[in-house]
Amino acid sequence: MSTRTPWWIRIPALFFIIFGLMEYFIDSGDKPAIIEYPITQFFMLMVLLILIAIELILSSIENVMFQTLSPEAKERYLAAKNKKREWTWINNVYARLTKTRAIEKEGEIIMDHNYDGIRELDNVLPPWWVYMFYATIIFAIVYLIRFHVAGDYDQKLEYEQEVAAAKIAIEEYKKTAKDLVDVNTVEFLADASDLSAGEKIFTTNCVACHMADGGGGIGPNLTDEYWILGGGIKNVFNTISEGGRDGKGMIAWKQSLKPVEMAQVASYILTMGGTTPANPKAPEGEIWVDPDAPESEKTEEEATPAEQVTDSTDVAMN
Ligand code: HEC
């Protein structure tokens, strides 16, 4: 019994081993299982209670057994128990791994040269070092056979696999991190959930000037194909984010809306295109044609986006 570790090491050690095993075996995605599945917190609490209970039971058994001992046996038991823990096992391992010679035995291995009082011991190579050296030899053999004889994967393949895995991870990440969109990456969000979220944002923030059906009031008609600041998801997102021209009344919404919200409301606005509002405001701006659309759909008068913006400004100022 004298070598037993004290309870205050045993309980935490077992607890964290079980905790580690649980985290290892329960697949909980990015978050630790203890957060992802609250039931595991209860499980760990139970583990802790059981560990404590076991400790209590063991110590009471020990106590009961102790009471049954004869007085001399009690004394011997206590003496054994109170004996300082000796780290014999660790000391032995340490001695075997270093093979150091005790200082009083150095005379056996001292070499007979002497340079100005500096003398040399003929120590053996420390076994821990030798074992590591053997390990590198084994590693080298396995490596040689695996990559130079058997021709397992090479660096190029490894690189390509990592890039492919990273691309998948980026796609996954983009799905969960919609807030990363900006004017360069924004895309039309066709999901019903995004569109209904966009509608809600529109109803809360935009109907005062654009009307619930997008027909327009203070702000322009959003349902026709004429756009002052350019149509298409990128331009509309940019307008919402940066606002309209100075003094027109359309503020920059990037202060109050998150990027994903602007993408949602922009997508919602695009779904209103072609609908017939109750009181449509007269068209303002230019017919907008997507410059990314296939060539064949373009006609002569259609300008490049840059010219379009200047043109539309002129139109609106006239
Ligand atoms: C205070 C009134 C007002 C509110 C509120 C408002 N807008 Fe506007 N909006 C305008 C005006 C005015 C313009 C024209 C800007 C210009 O001419 O530069 C405009 C232009 C736009 C345009 C560009 C239209 C075009 O023809 O290019 C879009 C898109 C737009 N608003 C979307 C929104 C969205 C989305 C919201 C709500 C988040 C919103 N607006 C809220 C007044 C408003």
Image: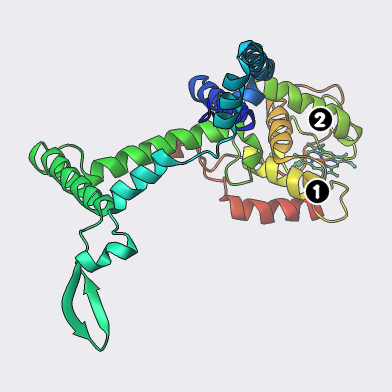
Q: Position of residue 122 (x, y in %)?
A: 19, 66
- For mark 1, does the 10 Å Cα neighbourhood hold few (<14), some (14 to 19), or many (20 or more) residues? some
Seen in the picture, residue 74 relative to 101 is either above or below; the reply is: above
Please indicate, yes or no, whether residue 103 appears anywhere in the rendered image. yes
Q: Secondary structure at mark 1?
A: loop
Front-lying residue, 35 or 52: 52
Q: Which mark is residue 202?
A: 2
Instruction: Name the spot of residue 295 as percent of width and height, x first.
Output: 45, 39
Amino acid marked by disc 2: Phe
Q: Is mark 2 within 8 Å of ligand 1?
A: yes
Q: Residue furthest bottom?
A: 116
N-terminal of the two: label 1 or label 2?
2
Model colouring: rainbow
Identify the mark at residue 252; answer none if there is no mark: 1
Q: Quadrant of ligand 1?
A: top right
Frontmost residue, 296 versus 261: 261
Identify the residue at image location x=30%, y=57%.
Answer: 100
Instruction: Find the distance from the CA under tag 1 to the CA under tag 2.
Output: 14 Å
